[in-house]
Each structure stands twice: as structure tokens, then as C-alpha cells.
Image (cartoon, grey):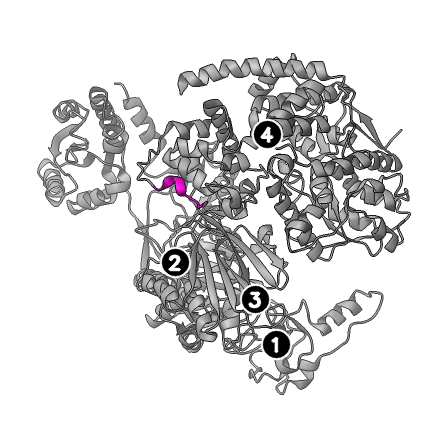
Amino acid sequence: MYYAGMVIIETITPSPSSQLRSWVERESGQKIFRCYQCGKCTAGCPAAYTMDLTPRQIMRAVQFGLKEEVLKSNTIWVCLHCQTCSARCPQEIDVAKVMESLRLLAVMEKGKAAVEEVKIFHDAFLSNLWRFGRIYELGLGASYNLRSRHFLTNLSMLPGMLSRGKLPILPRSAKGTSRVKAIFSQVYAKEKESEMERKGTA
Amino acid sequence: MASLTFAYYPGCTLHTTAKQYDVSTRLTCQAMDIALEELKDWTCCGASSAHLTNPLLAIALPAKDLQQAEERGLPIAVACAACYFRLKLAAHELSNKATNDLVGEVLGKRIDHIPQVIHLLQVLESKKADIAVKKPLTGLKVACYYGCLLVRPKNTVGFDDKENPQKMDSLIQALGAETTQWNFKTECCGASFVMARSDIMLKLSHRVLSQAQQSGAECVAVACPLCHSNLDSHQKEMNAKFADKVELPVLYFTQLLGIALGLSPRELLFDQHFTNPMPLLKEKGLA
Amino acid sequence: MARVGVFLCHCGTNIAGVVDIPKVMEAAKKMPQVVYVADNRYTCSEPGQASIRQAIVENRLNRVVVSACSPRMHENTFRKTVAQAGLNPYLLEIANLREHDSWVHASYKEAATAKAIELIRMAVAKALRDEPLLPKQIGLTKRALVIGGGIAGIQVALDIANTGYDVVLVEREPSIGGRMAQLDKTFPTLDCSACILTPKMVEASQHSKITLLTYAEIMKVEGFVGNFEVQIRQKARKVDHTKCTGCGICWQKCPEKVPSEFDMGLGNRTIIYIPFAQAVPGKPVIDTAHCRYIKYQEFVAQKKEGKKPPQCRICERLCPTGAVDWEQQEQILTEKFGAIVVATGYQTFDHSVYGEFGGKSYPDVISGLQLERLLSASGPTGGEVVRPSDGTHPKTVVFVSCVGSRDESVGRPYCSKVCCMYMAKQAILLKEHDPEIQSYIFYIDIRAGGKDFEEFARRAQEEAGALYLRGRVSKIYQQGKNLMVLGEDSLLGRPVEIPADLVVLATGMEPARGVADLARLLNISYDSYNFLIEAHVKLRPVETQTDGIFLAGSCIGPRDIPESVAQGGGAAAKVAALFSKDTLPIEPMTAVVDPLKCVGCLACVEVCPFNAPAPQVLRDGRTVAVINEGLCKGCGLCPVACRPGAITLRGFTDQQLLAEVNALWQ
């Protein structure tokens, strides 16, 4: 059974000045201890009902420096980035930005996501983008279904989409595709450099 | 000579699943003497996938398109709300010198004059006084749905009130329609979770539609292809899953504008919707 | 020939732990005209002060330099000490060896010792040029002005009046009583608010020493402590209160109605009206913005097109004493006062900025003060709690705390202090009204730090059965007839959804409208939320930085009733103490203009924050500036601004300051 807070039932010792906190503060530009745990983020979060740690608990866990709990939570992956939390936070903390920084850390440290489908989708999306410069939706759907092994996802939509002429069957590469590929390789090169640096400081 | 000229960035979906949006945008802008010059060789903005996994890529991809608009010396008008969000945010982040330098290294060139990024709704709303309404949408009750990406974050991206935005409402009202009062204008529809977690998307989109229906609306107007696809194409699945049944045509605001300007539903691709809007249009004498 | 004594204080180890005292003493002995040097563990102690007095007498000292802590701390103490030994108190100088030296340079002992020597050398150089100064005395008007007629202002007026001094109580609204008059019952004793307030309102109106000026506002304030001159605008009531008997026929028969401010828009009032049944004075005013006849007059006067508004004049025709007076105009009164007390109170935060709570579009989302009106037997529903939308009795009531409090995003980061308790009170009262009502209270922290407060908050939970949920609400929306309230119970860590019949937003306190303008008229300071600022938050809580102007109640910050009453009493005691003297001494360290050097440019008038300098025409026709010593604070702005050098600040002359500078590094 799912119940919230289930990862924090062991006795814990908080570390208020953890590396996790300084990472998050640096990457997100948000001050973690501004959060006074009112829960308005969670109350308004459209996906909170399906999270193992609520957004407020994520903030608390970062205050406590509970890196493992945070990085293995599904929360950071089912966050829709709708930014309702950030828009309504009484302390004006950009909670969505905090989630963003935690996702990056999770990818860096774990290489995979707690909710794999989400990362598979994003990876499929980006490789589609890399190949064609623009998104070729039929290919994206097929590639997601293959990678995630959810072969039937959205398949029921397919006839409707095709009959309405919404999906071209064959991909067309955009003229700018070569520049997009160049951007990808430049960015990945830069990422490698700075990842080395970060690992050095961490 | 058109009264206003923009570099036009349609976004990937406007060439595929959201053709109606692209076509209605071009037709209405033409009718309103707004010139849209489509950016040649535009590529994908990276959408949430770049944003959620790689911050530098998330700026560099839209920056490439911004650079093209910069070369043309035009402000850039975006139709897709998600692309608008990415481009607008990238433009904001590029105003930071260090970021601009870094992106300049990736692109091979800095962006010195960051072009203005503006959403199509802003463009058309600002010209609402000039709309020559041929077929007023009298008696049509519309729930205007803005979604997340036009209003949040309020200081960098949002161009309207973050909880109760008004710009689409005032545009639709100018066409003679009635807009309904409801409190889900900016609640999330589930966005890109359509594939990875369609259960979340269905729940959220259903909540939005049910609230719109409860407000007395006969259709929903949107300004985002992702919102449109989530709200329009999955109503059957929602009705199979939830007790509270929904059946509500979901239209692009540009399609409603097109009808009011006297364009035919056929030109505006009203036949491409999953939830058929034609009976409603016929009932109101609009088709 | 000057004879200077230098007294070095160790301040325990505060100074002596860093500064090398024997070395400084040696250096001081060599300074010009220093004839006596001593040190002391605590100079401010009684033995320390006695040693100064003894040294002055024995060594015939005529200048004293105390090298100790900041003059803000003990300058007055040591001035009294030297005066007791027969020396003019302004022949004392302080060298600040603590805040300016030992505390900030604790790890650089040698440098700190060198700096101490320099500081003392400067003080000695200035002391040599000190002149004796004599404080002047001025007369005062023993009459107080109280601004604001809520519970704090009423208390101030009564307490001053009972010491025998005259008071004028000015209130902007048509009746005194303020916010407390709107409340149903008060926490934690559940006393009926009106029952304990109205006797005080009546007492104030009948007191021989109190003049009530309702429906009046402050226009202009001039002068200084003991001698204020204030212009008060008495707004036109269009009713002659000397003729009116308050019989009530007019307000029973007036045909036009608008939402009642007193009932927070939940009920209506007529246009000729008293705000509530127990209003003081119990005589009406005509709301000229909505009166039919006044609209008719304007229509005719402006020769407008279209349909004429009705002439009406029903009140005039029915009034048995002929008190309705259409010709009555506003009046400007100019009055003299010796002291002013500001008690302008608060208003509740306007929750329309919270779009996520529907702005103000849901009639069944009400504020805490609106619920007070629904609970009150004299309220618009006669004490029946019903939903404004359909008049039905709510069974599920959800409270949302911290609306406009503890919220940086709406510019209100502070805690409003009373909301936790009024929610508990309202939950208890709701249960008394209807045992079937279930209350839910979303809170962040329960702040119940007052006498019997915690017990009272427990009672709301244990006896009235209110369910407290720890979390802030994020959204309220209509679902059929219900309002859905989305929150988190952060103790379970689960999102919560409650279908409510009625939602009560516990809106916080903010300063009353227009208080910043009033503060500027009075020349007192206010913070970024427009709360007025006390002279010292702990030790001078009812005084301002401007002598003779005092504060009481929630114009300073969120306060509950007992605190406001206590502060009212405190402010009254300060006023009475001021009025107990027949003259007031004024600080002699003021600026003075040499009329022979003054060119009449009046740059001093421009820069002075206290309105002390004013132009004066001499007999030879020249205009020069003259400084009112009663207003001058000796801040030193005008001597700097004076280009011909005509202004001198007594006690800080150019010669004295230059001597200090020249003494450095000798």
C-alpha cells in the first residue's frame, strides 16, 4: 500500500547544511530554508495525489539533507512543471525550479529515473528532435512504446489521428536539422566539462 | 503593407496534430492585416523534454530560433503556448550576460539584440478593437482555458493574471460570445504526460472539462496545441473512467475568431476535431 | 585656563580586555590642559560617578572627558553627574571606546589602544572649546488630541480626561466604536463585544472633559510638543446635530439603500443613517455620494441631459425638529493641543488579490469580520448564520488561516496575531448556534500565546469539535452548491479536499486606509506596511520619535483588545506626565542663525525634516531664516546646507569639530 512519508519512518539525524542543500540552492537559486512547510505547494499540486513524497516533504527532506530519499522519490519525475506551486508559494520560492534541479541531480547520480516512463519519453523526444530537427509524432510514439515496452499506449488514438490527416506517416527532416545536431554535440561537450567540475566540487 | 509584421514561429505540432491552429492563425491574421513571416528553417524549441533534462540545451535550442528572428529584425510571434514559454524563458535567460556568452559558444555567435517574444493571443487581443465582425458569435457560451504556460511564472513569462486571466475572455467577448466565469482557467491539463502517465493527464484534463461544463460553457477555447489535444481527443476515455461525463467541443481561439470574421468552418478545419463541434455551430447558426 | 579631567572606564573587560588602559592613561596625562586622569572598573556605577564628582571638586576641574561606551547609552547619566558637582552639563565630552573601538577591533589590541588614545585626544580638543549651554523653558497647552475613536482611542481619551485634562477625540466615521463594535463576542472569555464597549462609548460622549468630533479628519499639523496647532475638517453631515434628537424617523423612511460598511456589505443601510443601532452619537449623517436629492441638485446645477433624479427630500419632510440642513458645508476648525495620540487602528486585508480563492466571485467565501456580522444578534441576519448566496444554513464550514498574513507573495509577511484565536472563537460560536455545524480549520501554526488562549484553542477542538488541519489552502472552487477547498494535511502528508457550505477566510490586519498620509502630516515614521513606528520597540512602545506625539493600539502593529486598551492607558499616562509640568525644557543643542551673515536663501528651510527654520523679514527689509528652538532637533543638516556659514549648531560648532579633526595624529 502506498502511504506518504513512508521513507522517513526510521530515526534520522538532520543535517541542515548538507551537500544536497547546497547543490539545490546553487542550481535552483532558491533558498531552501525560506520554506516554512505550510503545504500550499502540495495543496495545489495536480499530481500530488500520485507522489510518494509531497512537494512540501521534498522541501523538508532537502532541508534535512536526505539525499537518497529525495533522489529515489517518484515526485521529481511526476512533477508536471505546471508551476502552480511556484506561483502560489507564500514565501515566493520557485518550487518547480527546485524539482528541476533535483531531476538533474538524479540523472547525474543515478543515470535513471524513479519513474522510468517519464525519462524514456523525454529521451525518445530528444532523439526524435536530434534526428529530424522537428518532432515527428508517429515516430516519437512508436519509439516511446518500444523503449518503455508499453506497446499499446495511445494506440487507440492512431486511427482517429490518421483519418483526420493529423499525422504524416513519413518523417520530413527540417532544413535546420544539421544545426540542431551541432547544438546537441556542443551542449553535450560542455555538459561533460562542467559535470567533471561539479563532481570535483561535490 | 500590413499594419503589423512578425516573424512567425508555428512549432512542430502546428504542422501535424494542430494543423487547425496553424491554418486558422494564418487565415485570421491575413484577414486582420497582420503579416506573419514564417521563420525559415525553424526547428523544435526542445519543449519540456529539453527543459526537464538539460538546462543548457533548453536555452540553446530556442536561442537558435531567436537568433534567426534577430537576423530578420522582427519580433517573434509564437502560436503554441509551450513553444512560447520556452522561447520567452530563453529570451529572459539570455539577458544574463554569462548565459548569453555560454549559449554564444554553443551557437557560434552571441545574441546581442534579443528579439521580443510575443504570443499570438497577445497580438490578436491588442487588435481586438479593429476586428470587423461579420458573423457575431451571439449566444455562444465559451469557457476560455489558458493553461499553465501563458501565465506562469508571472514575472518572466506570464502576460495576464496568474489565477484569473482575462485576455482571451475579452477577445472572445469582442466577437459577440459570452465567456463563463470559472476557476480552472490556469489549472494544468496534464501536459506532456499524455504518453508517460496518461492516467494523470486524463484525471487533470477531465477535471478541467468538467469544471468548464459546470460553468455553463458550450465549448472550450484554447491557445495551446497540447491543451487542445489533451482536452479534445480523450473525452471518450474520460467518460469510460469517470462518473462525471463530459462532452464539450474544444476549439482554438483563432478558429472562433475565424468564424466571426466570416471564414467557413471548412477552411478553418473544423472537421479535424475529435469532439465534433459542428452540431453546436449549426445550433447557433454559425455554420 | 581649562582644567580637564579624563575618566577611563574598563567596562568590566569590554574595554579593558582589549585596550591597554595604563598605556592610554599615560598618554592622556600628556594631553594639553589635562590635569587629572583616573580609571574605573564601571564608571557608570554609583561609586564611579561619585569619584567623578569628587575629582571635579578636589581638582577644580572645569571640563570632563569620560572615555567609556556610546553617548547614546550614558551621556545623560554623566551630564547629571557633572551637574551635581556644580559643572554645566554641556562641558562634558564622551569618547566612545567601546562600540567604536574595543568591540569592533577585539582582535587588534595594539591598534585598538592607539585608536583609544586618538579618540580621547579628539574629545579633549573639543572639550577645550565647549561653552556652557542653558536649556530654555517653554509653556504648553494642557489639552490633548486623540485621533481615532476605536477602543484604543476611547481608552486614551477617558484616561486623560479622568486625570483632569481636556481631550478632543476625532473620528473619521459617523460613530465612534471602531472595529470592536463590529465583533460579536470576544476571545477567550466570550464576552459580548458590544456589551463591554458601548458603556465606554457612552462614557466618552458624556464626559465633561471630552469633546467628540465624529465624521471629522485631520488636515494639517503644525508646531511642536506642548504647542501643536491642528486643523480639523468637520465633514458636512447635512444634519444639524444641535436640533436632531436621534428619533430615527428619517433613517427608517429613507427610500434609498446601499451596502452597509458596518455589516461588511452583507446588509444594507439607508442614505441618511447611523452606522449601527448603538452608534455614538446616535444622530445621523447623510451620505452625500448616494443621496437622491443631492444627485438631483447636482443634476440641475450641471444642466445635465436626460431623466431627472427624483427630488425625494423625505427625511427633511418627516423630521420633527427640522434638523436636515441641505446648506450645511464642511467646516475647518483650528485647535491648539499640547499632545497628540494616534490610535487609528486597522482594517482587514482585502482578499480579492487571492485569485486562487476565487477573488471575491464566490458569495459563500466570506471574511472573518463578515462572519462576525453574521454571528452578531444585531447583524444583518439577526444572528442567524446563513449562506449569503441562498440563505440556507451551512453545515460544513471551512476556515482558511493566514489570508494576507505570513505571505510574502502579497506583501504581508507578518503574523496578524489575532486570527488563530478568532477562528477558534468562531468555531465555538458556530457550534453554539447550530450543533450540526462541523468546522474545519486549516492552520499553519496555532499561535495562542496569551492568557487563557491555549486553553481556549483546545476548547475549540475538544468541545466544539473543530477539526484542525495543518496546512495552507491552495484553491477554492465551486462544485455544484458546494465550495471545494483544496489543502494539504501536512501531518499526514496527504492532499485534502473538503466540500464546504461556507468558507471563512481569516483575513489579517493591515493599517487603516490613509494612515501614511496622516503620519506625514504629523512627521512621525511608518514602516513599509504603513504601521506606525514606536520610539523604541521595547522600552518606549507608545512614544514616537517626535516629542509630544504618542501611539496606541493596532496602528503600530497587529494587537488584540486587551493590548490596545493597555496601550491606550500607557499613552494616556505619558500625556498626563507631560501635562503635569507647567513648562517644558528644550534641549539647548539647537541650530542658531546669525542674521548678519544670513543671505535669506532659505536652503535651511528646504533641508529641515522638522520644519524648524522659517523666513522672517527684518526691519531693514531683509529676509532671514529664524530657527524655532522648540522644533529643532539639532540634527545638523542646516549648518551643512548654509552656504554663507550663518548657521551654527550649539555644542557642535565648526571650531569644535575642526579642533577634533586637527587633534588626530598629533
Q: Secondary structure at mark 1?
A: loop
Local secondary structure at mark 2: loop
Mark 3 or 2, which is nearer the eye?
3
Residue at x-position 49% and y-position 36%: A74
Q: Chain of mark 1?
A: C
How far, Cα to Cα, is label 2 from label 4?
Answer: 84 Å
Q: Which mark is residue C264?
A: 3
- The chain to which mark 3 is attached is C
For residue B63, which numbered disc appears in the image?
A: none
- In the rendered image, residues at marks 3 and 1 fall on the same chain: yes
Q: Nearer the viewer, residue C75 or B148?
A: B148
* Residue pointed to by mark 1: C239
Residue linked to disc 4: A148
The image quadrant that residue A57 belongs to is top left
Tell me if mark 3 has few (under 14), some (14-19) or many (20+) residues whose alpha carbon lies within 10 angstroms of its own.
some
Q: Position of residue C589 (x, y in %)?
A: 33, 42
On the image, numbered disc 2 is attached to which residue?
C226
Above or below, C625 against B104 in this view is below
Total marks in image:
4
Q: Are marks 3 and 2 in contact (CB under 8 Å)?
A: no
Q: Tag 3: residue type?
A: Met
Tag nearer the camera, 2 or 4: 4
Relative to C90, is C352 above or below?
below
Q: SS of the residue at dot 4?
A: helix
Q: Residue C590's x, y, as percent?
A: 37, 43
Q: Amino acid at mark 2?
A: Gly
Q: Are marks 3 and 4 on the same chain?
A: no
Between label 3 and label 4, give the one nearer the viewer.
4
Towards the viewer: C448 or A99: A99
Quadrant of the rendering where the C terminus of chain C is positioned = top left
Q: Tell me how far mark 3 sits from mark 2, CA to CA.
A: 40 Å
